[in-house]
Amino acid sequence: MKQTRTYHNAEPFQVTVREDNCIIVSLEASDVVSSSSVYVVKIAGESKNYFFQFEEFNSTLPAPVVFSAKYHGLYYIVTLLVVNSNMVSKSARSITVLTKPLPVSSVSIYDYKPSPETGVLFEIQYPEKYNVFTRVNISYWEGKDYRTMLYKDFFKGKTVFNHWLPGICYSNITFQLVSEATFNKSTLVEYSGIQHEPKQHRTVPYPPRNISVQIVPINRNNWEEHSGNFAEESFMGPQEIIKKEKHSHFSDNPLEIPAVNTTAVSADYRHNSTEYETTSQPYWWSNEAESSEGEEEFVNALSSDYEANDVNTFGKLTPEPPSFLPVQMVVTWLPPKPPTAFDGFHINIEREDNFTEFLTVSEDTHKFVAELKEPGKYKLSVTTFSSSGSCEVRGSQSSKTLSFYISPTGEWIEELTEKPQHVTVTVLSSTTALTSWTASQESGGNSTIVSVVSLTCQKQKESQRLEKHYCTEVNSSSSLIENLVPGAQYQVVVYLRKGPLVGPPSDPVTFSIVPTGIKDLTLYPLGPTAVILSWNRPFLGVFRKYVVEMFYFNPSTMTSEWTTYYEIAATVSLTASVRIANLLPAWYYNFRVTMVTWGDPELSCCDSSTISFITAPVAPEITSIEYYNHLLYVTWTYGGDGTDLSHSRMLHWMVIAEGKKKIKKSVTRNVMTAVLSLPPGDIYNLSVTACTERGSNTSLPQLVKLEPAPPKSLFAVNKTQTSVTLLWVEEGVADFFEVYCQQAGSGQETKVQEPVTVSSHVVTISSLTPATSYNCSVTTFSHNSPSIPTFIAVSTMVTEMNPNVVVISVLAILSILLIGLLLVTLVVLRRKHLQMARECGAGTFVNFASLERDGKLPYNW
């Protein structure tokens, strides 16, 4: 039958929660207002609300509404709604219910390592889906007292509880999930069931305090007198020694070693049982236990039949006295600090030849006395144990282990408790170091042990180890440490030694040898954006990694700093290389490779292993070429759109046009256009070169063919009746000139002259017609391309005579013309004379004879 929990208020309306997480809503007679009304249940609490209607009823009440709740440990609000005939709903009343959380499925309890005496770690597992709880109820028995508490500091099912008592057995530990809800000033609480197995745990007891040991010599006469004749009362009583165990790694015990049979009550905590056993006392000690109150004293000594046991294999007595006189060891301690529940103490005595004695004494015993019969090095520890209750027996941690040495002469050398102070290591060279420390005056005569171990070996794989001498701990009495390896990291611990006893270690000192650094750093460029760095390392050296760094101006951050580009793990190879890509073209870089070894901080070497380099520029790209008025306009681009030349190592651009003549022009880096004056008529191989201090890069060449230019300043320098000499000025580059003359006619058919091809800038055109006009043209040809012709009009001269004949003819004509002019003059004068004579009369007489006599008439008159 399922359990139910009923929730109700003053009204009869009832809501119950079953164990299967179902909510049962029952309608009572007092809830019925009208038979015509409809009754609806509203359940809220989850992500959505649920509505359920009671079945129609008359005289009998309807069946309860059953709602299967999804969440465990969640509170639900159940409301009864009454809907009348007008479809108007009215809230009659509400009840809040709380479902029970699912139980814890498993529990684990561990020691809280920082404080196992008072702390435990709880780890619980429970269903997490649809399970809600606010706190965890922890119930347990603390010894004979029952405890319970609510705890809420669980994170992922784990919490640390640090309030238990040391050495107590905590049993029947159970966990319950608790769900709580507050509604209308009322609090609902539900506890989950208990399904996990109850646990038990015992805390660790505290160790005893103020453990001390003292060695007391025994009088030799008393020893010889009483050896082999001790009374039974001198043995340690069984009521004081609960358990005694002897452990030895040697199977051969000398027959002359006396043995004592002691009946002891054993409380073997390992098996949680009580048994009786008989153990033999080892040959090198006898003991006695003394209670703290000093009421009784028990001394363990040799049994009375010592001489009977001290025989050889032939049954003969060996009455020789022992070479070592036993000494008495007195061990005292105080009980552990309260509150600690404990049931006794464990005493563990070890000797250097692997003999171990393990004893258990009661909680009232605070002093232990034993006689040591053999010299040697001893170790003594006293611990507390707790065994009462059903939990496993647990012992305390050893607070202090005492060491001492008994020499063959009976000298007691106390444990060295002082450790060397202010240990320092001074590195003298890459392979040696010097250790120094300080100690008190009391320990000034003690020797020392310097223990050195390489920490580098522990951090490297065996196949990759470069340092092997100190891979295991090496002890030395010298303060000078040799055979060190550059780059290795070492740990040094110093011990004080007195006889065979070694004191506590000093605080470890770690030091590192600076690595030697790389050598032969070489750079191989792979282009404008990549290089290869290669280097060697010394054979003797240890390091952790190579660190490749580069220094450059970062245009995105506008800063210059060393940045790590790559780290390469150390290998046994003596040569290493790395490819560095994504560099900026035409940029200044400084590369550095350092060897980094272990250390705090890490040691590295060396910053001087650097190499500088200016990357080559990328090739420009010619974008446009235009030729106008004998000028070539060139435009180019460089890199991407965001290329920054303001901080690059670009010096200038070199624009080169190479034809029959090579023309260069240097352009500043901020300008990406150039104007070249190129002679026309040639084919040029045009390129743009980006130049830096140490390199350059040239664009793809562009072929530019310029049309030849026509001749200029064309003159006719000489002409005859049949030839004309033409002279012109050559411009640009020309392979040859073609001269063509055609007679200037008036539409009539004229004789066409054949073109004349010449390679010079002067030509004579012959076979022309005298006294004739011609139109001549000169065309420049370069690379089989003609230029625009240049025209000139010329005329030939008329036919010429012999020059002598021409002169005579001209003189004859001039003479005739002169004589004719004289005759005309005389005729004209004669006519004028006759006319004057008629006008003056006949009386006028001219005596020609007198005129002739006076010489006034011409000779030939």
Image (tube, rainbow, N blue to C red):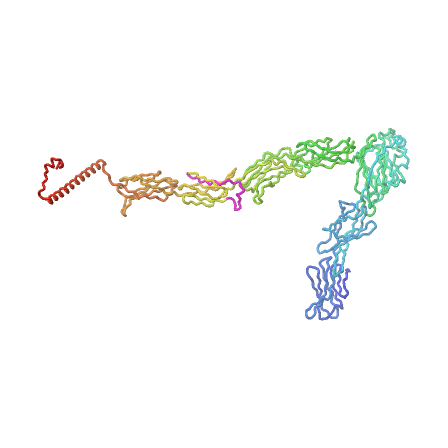
Q: How many marks?
A: 0
Task: Please state which of residues 226 and 530 is positioned toward the viewer in this rendering.
Answer: 530
Q: Where is residue 190 in the image (x, y as percent from the top left)?
A: 76, 57
Q: Is residue 648 magenta?
A: yes
Quadrant of image for the N terminus: bottom right
Measured as percent of width and height from the top left, residue 40 is found at 71, 66
Q: Mainly helix, strand or loop, the magenta region?
A: loop
Q: Which residue is drawn at 52% across and 44% down?
A: 639
In the picture provided, is 440 more to the left or to the right than 652? right
Write down the region rendered in magenta.
638-660
State whether residue 250 is above or below residue 645: above
Q: Quadrant of the C terminus?
A: top left
Residue 698 percent across, percent down from the top left: 49, 40
Which residue is more in the foreground, 610 or 821? 821
Residue 627, image quadrant: top left
Residue 732 occupies quadrant: top left
Q: Where is residue 385 in the image (x, y as percent from the top left)?
A: 82, 43
310 versus 55 height, above or below: above
Q: Can residue 500 be seen in this view?
A: no
Q: Work out whether 385 lies above or below 254.
A: below
Question: Looking at this view, is 770 or 700 the one in front?
Answer: 770
Magenta includes 162?
no
Farthest residue toward the top? 320
